[in-house]
Image (cartoon, rainbow, N blue to C red):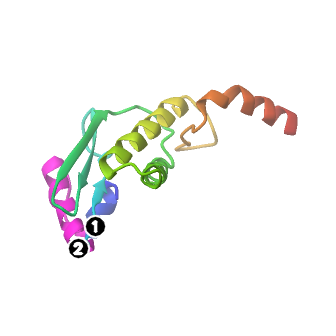
Amino acid sequence: PNIDEAKVLTGKSIHNIQDMQAAAKMLTDDYHTSILLKGGHLEGDNMCDLLHTSESIYHIYEEKKIESHNLHGTGCTLSSAIATYLAKGYPMRESIQHAKTYTTQAIIAGKELNVGHGNGPLWHFPDSVAQMCTFCAVVS
């Protein structure tokens, strides 16, 4: 879950890493599984996601926030990428790191897109921009 979703699930306010740890532990205890709490909505210049495993091990994934209005689908992209890396046989922590790298690249690639109104999408295929534009021009 992201921070807003974790607030609903736990009934607790979340403002910092310590609050994230407490919420993730509560969710891990309630659901008997590892929890990755997305921290993109935290204040500040860094984005911190927190993994709390069912063995009560914490791991923080931290990087600079990327300013973009095109963040629609970030959580779905991250969770799908994690599932993909797990299916490929990577352990949980490594799957999350690979998935975060993929998601970050999609955010960077899509931050200048101007699609529709409001919060736009990530760009999953940055190397195929020219191919997509050519295809769209031919189809229309």
- Magenta stretch, residue numbers: 10-31
- Element carrying mark 1: loop
Question: Which residue is more in the foreground, 84 or 116?
Answer: 84
The structure residue drawn at horizontal position 28% and vertical position 62%, both measured from the top left corner, is 6
Q: Which residue is mark 2?
A: 30
| Residue 85 place in picture, x, y as percent | 44, 49
Q: Nearer the viewer, mark 2 or mark 1?
A: 1
Question: Which residue is more in the foreground, 101 or 94?
Answer: 94
Which image quarter is the C terminus in? top right
Q: What type is the residue that disc 2 sits on?
A: Asp
The structure residue drawn at horizontal position 21% and vertical position 47%, both measured from the top left corner, is 59
The structure residue drawn at horizontal position 30% and vertical position 55%, both measured from the top left corner, is 36
Q: What's the mark number on residue 96?
A: none
Q: What crowding class fits label 1: few (fewer than 14 Cα within 10 Å), some (14-19), or many (20 or more)?
A: some
- Element carrying mark 2: helix
Q: Quadrant of residue 138?
A: top right
Q: Which residue is mark 1?
A: 33
Q: What type is the residue that disc 1 sits on?
A: Thr
Q: Quadrant of residue 122?
A: top right
Is 130 left, or right, of 109 in this rendering?
A: right
| Residue 115 place in picture, x, y as percent | 63, 38
For the residues marked 2 and 1, what is the alpha-carbon distance in whole angstroms? 8 Å
The structure residue drawn at horizontal position 22% and vertical position 44%, both measured from the top left corner, is 60
Is 116 left, or right, of 20 in this rendering?
A: right
Residue 28 in view of the camera: yes
| Residue 11 place in picture, x, y as percent | 22, 69
Q: Quadrant of residue 7?
A: bottom left
Which image quarter is the N terminus in? bottom left
Q: What crowding class fits label 2: few (fewer than 14 Cα within 10 Å), some (14-19), or many (20 or more)?
A: few
User: Is residue 29 highlighted in magenta?
Assistant: yes
| Residue 21 place in picture, x, y as percent | 16, 55
